[in-house]
Amino acid sequence: MKDTISDRIAATLAAIPLELERVKSELATGLQAFAGNTALQGARVLPVGPTGRPLAWAGPGRLVGWSVRAGEAAAALTLRDSRQAGEGDVVAVLDVPAGESATVWLGPGGVSITEGLYVETAGDVTAGAVWLGAVD
């Protein structure tokens, strides 16, 4: 059978959605390495506690560490691979005694998250941040 022009056009048109999906994926991966217009050279800093949002990150990434300070009462944080409270796998549990801070670096490999990073807080979290590495 000979390829006709209409067969080649049909094959080219059928390939367009796959190519668009590939380009979209490459762009999304590349943009995650930027904060605003600045290329990130290290981990992304995401605030937790009074200045942060419960859904610290909506998407895949690598948790590479955290730093949290408790106020006059103890603080507790549960980090989940999820976009909603009480759902998803627990990635880390942090208990910080009153008046102290805890800083943990997990290394550049970190812990992979696939859905997002949801932070549940209890007690007196006065300041804190989690550090998210780039997507694998």
Image (spheres, grey):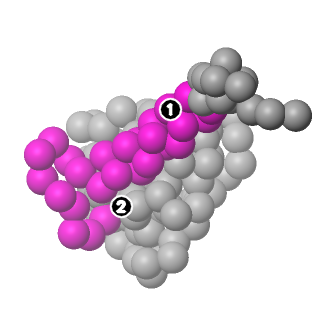
Q: Nearer the viewer, residue 72 or 76?
A: 76
- Asked if residue 41 is positioned above or below residue 118 in the image, the reply reads below
Q: Main secondary structure of the magenta part?
A: helix
Residue at x 54%, y 37% (from the top left corner): 19
Q: Is residue 22 left or right of residue 47?
A: right
133 drawn magenta: no
Amino acid type, residue under disc 1 in the picture: Leu
Instruction: Give the farthest residue toward the right.
Output: 1
| Res. 82 image quadrant | top right
Q: Which residues are magenta?
A: 14-43
List the single residue furthest toward the bottom: 107
> Tag 2, which secondary structure?
strand
* Amino acid type indicated by mark 2: Trp
Q: Which residue is mark 2?
A: 131
Mark whose residue sits in front, 2 or 1: 1
Front residue (pair 54, 121): 54
In the rendered image, residue 13, in percent from the top left (x then y), is placed at 60, 23
Q: Which comes sooner in the sequence, label 2 or label 1?
A: 1
* Residue that mark 1 sits on: 20
Secondary structure category for the residue under label 1: helix
Can residue 38 be seen by looking at this rendering?
A: yes
Q: Could you tell me residue 14's position as x and y percent? A: 66, 25
Q: Is residue 41 left or right of residue 17?
A: left
Q: Residue furthest left?
A: 37
The alpha-carbon separation of the residues under discs 2 and 1 comes to 31 Å
Could you tell me which residue is drawn at 12 percent across and 53 percent down?
Answer: 38
